[in-house]
Image: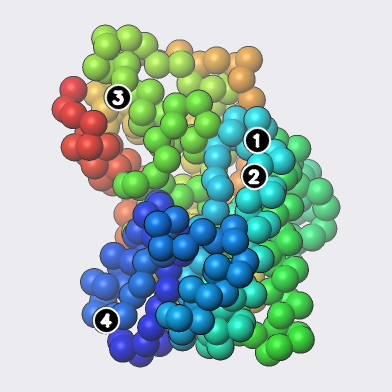
Amino acid sequence: MKKEDRIVVTGARGLFGSAMVEYLRGLGYQNVIGVGREECDLTDLPATRRYFAKIAPQYVFHAAGRVYGIMGNMNNKALSFYDNVLINTSVVDASHKAGVRKIAVMGTGAVYPYPPPALPFTEEMIFLGEPHKSEDSYSHAKRAMLGMLRAYGESYGMDWTYIVSCNLFGPRDRFDAEQGHVIPSLIKRFHDAKRNGARVAVWGDGTAQRDFLYVEDAAKAALLAMENVQGPVNIGSGNVYTIREMVEALTDVSEMQGRVDWDSTKPNGREYLGYDLSKITAAGFKSENTLKEGLEKTWNWYVTQEGAV
């Protein structure tokens, strides 16, 4: 990509999209166009086509979607599938019709089969079985986008990369205590409990294992994928932590030692999500933030927004 190219980033007010816009502008890209709901309803295919035709982007980073954590995915399966299929279909088709040179889309580690055919996950495993039941509707919508990209590549010569991300976290996430992803939901719970002098209930038993990547590092990985990778590509920090280890780090960051209770009646989700990062590593990627550094930055940002405790 050249610094003067027109680059569209969808989901530009969300976790990844906002970080992508900031990262590109910080590198000197002059025509980065952030797209949120205010600019275009991406569930509306004709409106999306008109918008992309007007903007005429050369490159697209597609990060928009209806996103939940484990409980939100379980409670909103139909809505998650419907909205994500509409959004992804509109953006991919509108990008093709607008003559986009390449599109990089955000997938999710939830697309991988359960139980896993092998570990860590490689990009070739995506369609080797059903996804985990707790997130299957969201996963199938994301798999459908991969199928669409393959079809548009074969039929129209569309150039694309499909970024399979680990658990991302950082500023401007969805800090929903009940339906958000694990880190932002816990940050909200920890903040509320600290403010109220209460204890924090953490779902599950802490044994599930995840690769967590701070969102600024994810933006760096996405640009490398856009420039160097064709097809699906895993991104992650390369470090897998138990939920208990992550919670202990967050406890230190928030100074909430001794005020955590584990609720084993709540679901753990998948036991393990770790990824083969050979492709993105070959493109030159290395994460710069440790888990604790990313947690400190995210906690401090949230406290700034919600008020010190």
Q: Count every numbered label the image shows and give the total.
A: 4
In the rendered view, how is the structure colored? Answer: rainbow
Q: CA distance from mark 1 to mark 4?
A: 38 Å
Q: Nearer the viewer, mark 1 or mark 3?
A: 1
Element class at badge 3: helix
Percent position (x, y) of residue 155? Answer: 76, 86
Q: Quadrant of the N terminus?
A: bottom left
Instruction: Please tell me whether mark 3 or mark 4 is closer to you in this view.
Output: 4
Which comes before the other along the chain, label 3 or label 4?
4
- Tell me whether the residue at label 2 lies in contact with that at label 3, contact meaning CB atoms closer than 8 angstroms: no
Task: For label 4, count other residues whose C-alpha is less than 10 Å away and answer few (under 14), some (14-19) or many (20+).
Answer: some
Q: Which residue is mark 2?
A: 80
- CA–CA distance in space, label 2 to label 3: 28 Å
Q: Is residue 157 visible?
A: yes
Residue that mark 3 sits on: 191
Where does residue 166 sit, x and y in percent of width and height? 53, 52
In the rendered structure, the answer to whether residue 8 lies left or right of residue 149 reads left
Depicted 284 relative to depicted 274: above or below: below
Residue found at x 59% / y 58%: 43
Q: In the rendered image, which quarter is residue 210 located in?
A: top right
Q: Are marks 1 and 2 in contact (CB under 8 Å)?
A: yes
Question: Is residue 280 something that shows in the picture?
Answer: no
Judge by depth and name the residue closer to the eye, 301 or 128.
Answer: 301
User: Residue at label 4?
Assistant: 30
In the displayed structure image, the side of residue 22 where residue 65 appears, left or right:
right
Tell me the kind of residue under disc 4.
Gln
Q: What separation in Å lies between label 1 and label 3 (alpha carbons)?
A: 26 Å
* Alpha carbon separation for disc pair 4 and 2: 34 Å
